[in-house]
Image: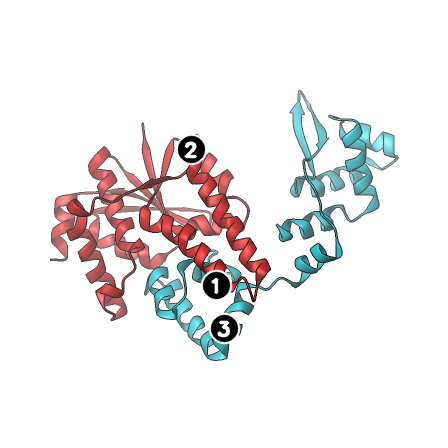
Chain colours: A cyan, B red
Amino acid sequence: MVEKTVEILRAIGNLNKARIIAHLAKHRGETAESIGKHLGYPLPTVYKYLRELEAVNAVESEARGNTRVYFAGEFKLEVSPQKLMEAFEEQTMMELYKARFGAEGVEKLRKVAAKAKAGKMTFRQAAASLGITYFEFVSLLDEVGALDA
Amino acid sequence: MRRYLVVDSSVLIFYDRRGALEDFLRQKKKENYTVVIPKAIALEVVDEAKEFAEEIKQVAPAAANRILASVERISAAVAQGLIQVVTVNYGKYSKVMDNVRKHLSRLDAASEYAVKKGDPELVALVIQLYDEVKEKVFVATLDKGLLKALKPFIKDVEYEIMKTWALIAINLDVTLKIGILD
């Protein structure tokens, strides 16, 4: 997924974090203390980096007794000019909708989405009234943050 | 004890967009829920989504690919048995579905023939499953309008808000329900 590419790049786009991953690829199941000692990083910094890397599954951990050990995650990053272009230039569903239906369509979407969000019509009814698929309608709602409580 | 959780498309799409669909489904399986969807919903999140991706692929290939990837993940979840697709018994529940269509078309001042299958099938499936197990049937949806549409068909509704979506535990008295909108 291109979103995953950006997420991973953001997380490991730092030489010290990349070194941690490289170290764990060679030395599986190390503690944060051991990583810090080997690489010469302060322990709070190591923990911070490990948290950020775990959030994107670039690193995994498991509890062993009273301690936690770390492993390099299973990920593959394809970095090429093409992939970077796709990552940063992908169209949102809203941009796509606007290109197809114009400003008038966006205004209609706004009104229909408000009705659907208020429970005055179902999402399916809303999608049908806009002439779009349910999938597109829900994706649009999600993009504008209308699905969160 | 088997517990049915009828999941609306809105929840499937919501979790899939966050890369969390499989985790959600496996968690529900761990909690002894059988996650089910009616056929109309399976069509929405697979066939219709594929058609939409095909429609936009010339102008937005990246978006089309994302949609197709989503379709693959949902199809894989069905293939792995994490989601069961259940056919609603139209012969037995056509009256319920007609009543749901009438009810929804009144809300929207539109023809009942314009009401998409997903809503009436979801309501009918909830009732069908209750008939099967005579136990609470759970429903997960982000669609407030759909929750309201369910209300006339059920006797007691308990709302349990879980994170960003409403989980309803429903006790059904089916005989009473079908009569309401005649």
Is the residue B69 above or below the residue B63 in the image?
above
Disc 3 to disc 1, C-alpha distance: 11 Å
Give the labeled residue for mark 3: A100
Mark 3 Cα-neighbour bin, 10 Å: few <14, some 14–19, many ≥20:
few
Mark 1 falls on what kind of element?
helix
Q: How many labels, in total? A: 3
Mark 2, Cα crowd under 10 Å, few <14 / some 14-19 / many 20+, is some
Q: Nearest the camera: B124 or A66?
A: B124
Where is residue B22 drawn, in percent x and y?
Answer: 50, 40
Q: Which residue is mark 2?
A: B29
Q: Which residue is mark 1?
A: B55
| Label 2 SS | helix
Which residue type does callout 3 highlight?
Arg
Query: Are marks 1 and 2 in one subunit?
Result: yes
Amino acid at the residue labelled 2: Lys
Q: Is residue A28 left or right of residue B143?
A: right
Q: Nearer the viewer, mark 1 or mark 2?
A: 1
